[in-house]
Image (cartoon, rainbow, N blue to C red):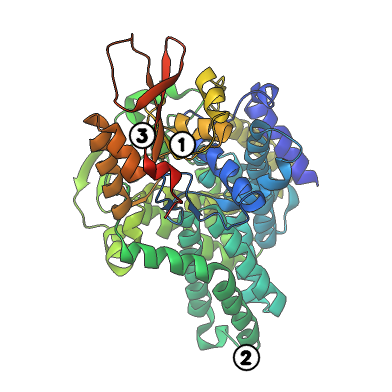
Amino acid sequence: MVPLFVYFLAFTVLTFPLMTLFSSHFFADTRDGLQNVWNLWWVNKAVTELHQLPWHTHLLHYPYGISLLPHTLNPFNGFVAIPLLQVMPLEQAHNLIVIFSFIVGGLTAFLLAYRFTAAYWPSMVGGFIFTFSNFHFAHAQGHLQLVSLEWIPLFLLLWYSLLDKPRVWTGFGAATSLFLVLLCDYYYFFFCVLAGGLMLLWRVSLDGAAALHKEHRLPLAAFAAGCLVSSGPLVGALLWLAHRDRLIGAHEANEFSLDLLAPFIYGGHWRFSQWTQGYWSKLSGNIHESSVHIGLTVLLVAAYACWMRKDLACPKGVGLWLLIGGVFAVFSLGPALHIWGREVVHGRLPYAWLERIFPPLRMSGVPVRMIVMTQLAAAVLCAWGLDHILRTKRPGRLVAAIGLGLLLFEYLPAPIPTTRLETPSYVEFVRGLPTRGGIVDHYAGVNSPQALLWQTRHGKPIAFGYVSRVPQNKLLKDLELRALLYSGSFLEACSRFRVSEVVTNDVPDGEESIPGAKTVFRDGTVRVIALDCPALTQPRG
């Protein structure tokens, strides 16, 4: 309970006055943040009202619907939101999940650090370093699936325990924690599998064939069976979908790669980012991805731990975290080396090999996110180093106090954005309409996050919808519908795509005439046009 309280207090202080807006604003931006708000709403609706699994919806890209398997759905947060939404509004449920991820992320990182260092307060600092990192705050802009990094340290803790002291229940626990990672984010799932493999190789390299004894067989079998039952169906379904139908929307790996200097120079989500704008403004991608500085204090103390490893508890573990941190740092550089925003080595780095070995990795295209594992490794190593410093008594305490002060300065985050959107009157009007078909919301933007937010208010199916990965066959249908709408063939759109209402900018009478359509709402800014065709009276195919 002490770490939870400490990390909650730290979150409140570091983000002040964010908590004063807990009930009125979403702790998110107006783009991917609103998409993740929709995710929470949809999982609740799918489970409690439609009584179905949430990985497919007909409320977006109506009438065909769309698979949400390749979408950043983070259903874990959706499942958590189900009981919350019974007692609080969507804003509070979303914000509570954000806070939960920060404080529990600190707790699990603390437990992992304590497993290796056996030092309570240094491990507390390690948890702080992981959960209040620049990486974490950068993605708090709206990437709720990446904010939910709390299960990564738990999986690595249980996996290490399984290799060290094998027990059947530890195997099931490791499989369950890996499934929780998967329910939050596919990237993190892949990172954990890769880190677990590195941990296994490290142990075999130390002890040879004797690393895995007979007593490992049943616990490892329990782990494998647990993964097969829990994570297996979801991973298999995603890979099969990607094989069957090309997914559109992957990022360009070369654009979203780690700049070699980014871990050392304060990024765009630091409180005083204007001091280093001359650097981070030159980086490719955007500051939400490129802001990954680890902190000079953290790196120095982690390097000190490596230097003094013979005097530390579990000195062999230092090599493990050096391996994990180093491998993920190299992979996060992407396929080409960038320095100060310029590409200096073209397409020869290990990430390019990794894509060839594992082609589904091309669905992601954001290698810079792999730095989260380096951040975790640095947190564990820093806990080790701080423990050694503190054991030198009075000089050590003074050095530790100075270091903690510098750490707080380096980790001061830029404010998390907040969003409050008043529901437009046309959304309330649409909510009262009978559900006949799909709505095209040109006013909000057919693929805008605002259209998703308004759907959480009116509950009607919409013809398009902003999702992170779109199967190619769905994209082709969207293009057909767009062509009909832009050409003014609204009745054909109604017949072929069951479009029942079109929301658009209001225009004076006589400037727009649609045969067979009727304006049912207008307020001088927005106009709702109702369409009518035989397809709307037929059952959905």
Residue sitting at x 60%, y 59%: 180
Q: Is residue 283 visible?
A: no
Measured Cα–Cα span from mark 3 to mark 2: 50 Å
Q: Is residue 294 above or below residue 50?
A: above
Q: Nearer the viewer, residue 200 or 467?
A: 467
Q: Secondary structure at mark 2?
A: helix
Measured Cα–Cα span from mark 2 to mark 1: 48 Å
Task: Inspect the image, locate mark 1, and give the three-letter code of the amino acid beneath it.
Answer: Asp
Q: Which mark is residue 32?
A: 1
Q: Are marks 1 and 3 in contact (CB under 8 Å)?
A: no
Residue sitting at x 72%, y 54%: 119
Q: Nearer the viewer, residue 252 or 72?
A: 72
Residue sitting at x 42%, y 63%: 238
Residue 111 spot, x, y in % from top left = 69, 56
Residue 6 spot, x, y in % from top left = 74, 39
**Residue 472 as seen in the image, left or right of residue 539:** left
**Which of the two marks, 2 or 1, is nearer to us in this view?**
1
Residue 343 spot, x, y in % from top left = 21, 43
Q: Which mark is residue 286?
A: 3
**Residue 504 as seen in the image, left or right of residue 138:** left
Residue beneath disc 2: 214
Which class describes the residues within 10 Å of circle 2: few (<14), some (14-19), or many (20+)?
Answer: few
Residue 524 spot, x, y in % from top left = 43, 9
Which class describes the residues within 10 Å of circle 1: few (<14), some (14-19), or many (20+)?
Answer: many
Q: Is residue 397 visible?
A: yes
Task: Inspect the image, locate mark 3, and give the three-letter code of the amino acid beneath it.
Answer: Asn
